[in-house]
Image (cartoon, rainbow, N blue to C red):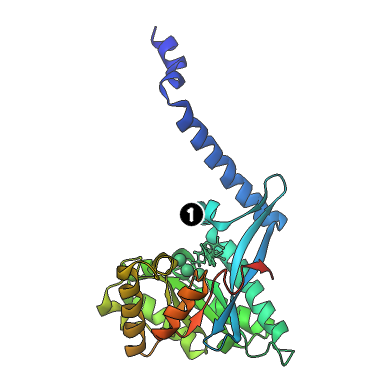
Amino acid sequence: QAKAAGRNTMRFFDPRMQAAVSSRVALEADLRNGLLRGEFVVYHQPQFDTHLKLIGAEALVRWRHPARGLICPGEFIALAEETGLIVPLGGWMLERACAHLARWARRAETRELTLAANVSIRQFRQAGFVEEVLDVLARTGANPARLKLELTESLLISDVESTVATMAALKRAGVGFSLDDFGTGYSSLAYLKRLPLDQLKIDRSFVRDITTDANDAAIARTIIALGHSLGLAIIAEGVETEEQRQLLQENGCDAFQGFLLGPPAAA
Ligand code: C2E
Ligand code: MG
Ligand code: MG
Ligand code: MG
């Protein structure tokens, strides 16, 4: 009896749950192999100032999957973070970003452009992260002043001392910092003021309805005022219409990124 019950245990699992678990395991193995096989590619999304002059870009990862086609980070970044694969993946993205910057430096038209790379908290907290960035900069010959690292507010939840120390070490080398998805996380203003940031990035969830929702407009205005009074530049992400861009600009937003001005495209 017991043996039969044991053998039939699987019966009691929700088959959908089982499918989810096995597809997660498969995705993890796939991710690992994808990294080894060089299936990841870099996309760039342009950023513009208030005169609509191109000032730089953000590097965004894509997965060119041999069977599934082009996959967006929403489908694999969370798992990459859970499994730690974000560390080698993020390291690779950083390397690519610096290589692009070094190439841009050779032409007058692209020399001044900045390139932003997203850095996951797990990657940022790795021992030796500062050395890794300095090493990649030295190896590629990229100008540190053109590299911007995008961090998220989750960084502020713990260990603010060491966060500030890591950022300060890279700042000394000339690297810039932007706080991504600002307003969606757990930022404590007491901590925010201690971070050596250069830029706040207004999250696209506030931009989306900015022309129709008075609360979103108020939040965006407040972020802009807060950032400026801390001496930071403000960029809005997810700008899809000219009306959104204009409202942001009227409220003092310094730079824009979004489908209106250019979608992410192969680097
Ligand atoms: P993010 O850093 O906030 O990047 C902006 C996301 O908004 C990108 O999604 C971009 O394609 C999308 N976007 C840009 N303009 C618009 C717009 O006008 N409307 C809308 N609705 N969306 C827009 P993507 O490329 O799918 O990346 C999603 C997230 O994945 C990124 O959000 C970032 O958190 C993460 N990510 C991407 N690449 C990397 C990476 O190399 N390392 C790490 N750690 N995370 C990455
Ligand atoms: Mg970003
Ligand atoms: Mg963002
Ligand atoms: Mg966002």
Residue appearing at x 71%, y 58% in the figure = 38
Q: Is residue 130 above or below residue 2?
A: below
Q: Is residue 208 above or below residue 22?
A: below
Report x, y in % for residue 183.
Answer: 35, 70
Residue 233 appearing in the image: no
Report x, y in % for residue 163.
Answer: 38, 76
From the viewer's side, name the closer residue of 55 and 149: 55
* Element on which disc 1 rests: helix
Quarter that holds the C terminus: bottom right
Residue appearing at x 41%, y 85% in the figure = 250
Residue appearing at x 62%, y 88% in the figure = 143
Instruction: Using the rendered view, name the quadrant where residue 60 is placed.
Output: bottom right
From the viewer's side, name the closer residue of 138 and 92: 92
Q: Going by the image, does 186 lie left or right of 32?
A: left
Residue appearing at x 74%, y 90% in the figure = 107
Q: Going by the image, does 239 lie left or right of 111?
A: left
Instruction: Using the rendered view, name the quadrant where residue 253 is placed.
Output: bottom left
Q: Is residue 30 above or below residue 254?
A: above
Residue type, numbered disc 1: Ala
Mark count: 1
Report x, y in % for residue 84.
Answer: 50, 56
Mark 1 lies on residue: 78
Residue 247 appearing in the image: yes
